[in-house]
Amino acid sequence: MDAAIAVPEGLGFFDIVRVTGLPFAVLALVVAWIAARIVSKVFVRLGDRFTDRRLLLNQVSTVLRFLVYLVGIVAAVSFAMRLTDEVVLALTGTVAITVGFAVKDLAASIVAGVIILVDRPFQVGDRVTFGGVYGEISSIGLRSVRLVTLDDNVVTIPNNKFLTDMVSSGNWGALDMLVQMDFHVGIDQDLALARRLVGEALTGSRYVFLEKPWEVLVSQILEDGYFAWRLRAKAYVLDVRFEKVFETDVSERVCEAFRHAGIGPPARLNRMLPPVLEGTERE
């Protein structure tokens, strides 16, 4: 069944498109793109200068770039189209159907981008895990979100994917973030001393955020067929950008402290595990 649209007789291409306005439409889009780039660079520099307000500045930058793009698109349409009542009446149906099928995914991503800004499941600067990929949100655009992995790879994800799939944010708008590190020692080692040394390594790091609580949890695990103590250190890092540097610093401190204290890694003891435990699932 064909959907017929009543088009006023004599309405042609030049009655719809303002040819003289096309250069201005292109210029409006170019200016919008340049303005968005300038806004992004300015706020990146401000974030580097005012580190305590970096995440807030990133969020403001995202909103401003949205507005710049929208203004550019509206300006381009107003320059290029003769939006008379007749033209609007003639094009409403066909444009809606044609554009709807052609850019439905793009439209869904744009709407999802607005929802992300309002609902805020994550923000620019957050460390998130999505689809098995972990990294920092570098930008939230009209169509997609860009995530930079710890290997410095840029992953582009359509906005509408975030409406149906689960996303985990490690810091959710805060500069600090909880970091978890595991250390293993032999079952016959001095557990109390090992735990104290891990705690000292945590609190002694220059990257730790001591205004939030830290802890060292102990559990016994089965590691490669033998028992071991697992010391799980949990503390907040000052800035998410120092996450891996923090882990490295604490790990070096713990290894050095264990070496001086004579605390050894897990190893098989003289008494082997009974056969019934050999098939125990490794944690």
Image: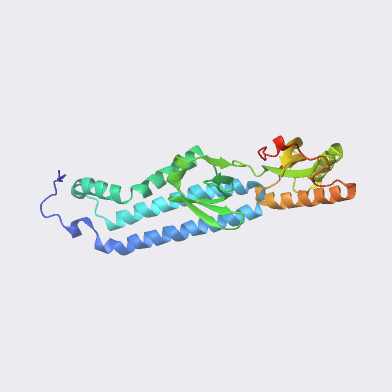
Expressed as whole percent of the image width and height from the top left, the position of residue 8 reads 12, 49
In the image, residue 97 above or below residue 19: above
Expressed as whole percent of the image width and height from the top left, the position of residue 41 reads 55, 58
All told, the count of numbered labels is 0
Q: Is residue 250 left or right of 18 when viewed as pictured?
A: right
Q: Is residue 121 left or right of 217 when viewed as pictured?
A: left
Q: Quadrant of the N terminus?
A: top left
Q: Residue at x 36, y 48 (%)?
A: 105
Residue in front for this viewpoint, 18 or 201: 201
Q: Is residue 223 left or right of 32 when viewed as pictured?
A: right
Quarter occupied by residue 170:
top right
Expressed as whole percent of the image width and height from the top left, the position of residue 182 reads 73, 43
In the image, residue 112 above or below residue 248: above
Instruction: In the displayed orientation, state which residue is furthest to the left.
Output: 9
Q: Residue at x 56, y 45 (%)?
A: 129
Q: Is residue 24 left or right of 16 when viewed as pictured?
A: right
In the image, residue 220 above or below residue 258: above
Residue in front for this viewpoint, 27 or 111: 111
Does residue 275 appear in the picture of this structure? yes
Residue in front for this viewpoint, 219 or 96: 219
Q: Quadrant of the C terminus?
A: top right
Instruction: In the displayed orientation, state which residue is furthest to the right.
Output: 261
Residue in front for this viewpoint, 5 or 179: 179
Expressed as whole percent of the image width and height from the top left, the position of residue 221 reads 73, 38
Q: Residue at x 69, y 51 (%)?
A: 244
Instruction: In the displayed orientation, state which residue is furthest to the front.
Output: 275
Does residue 88 appear in the picture of this structure? no
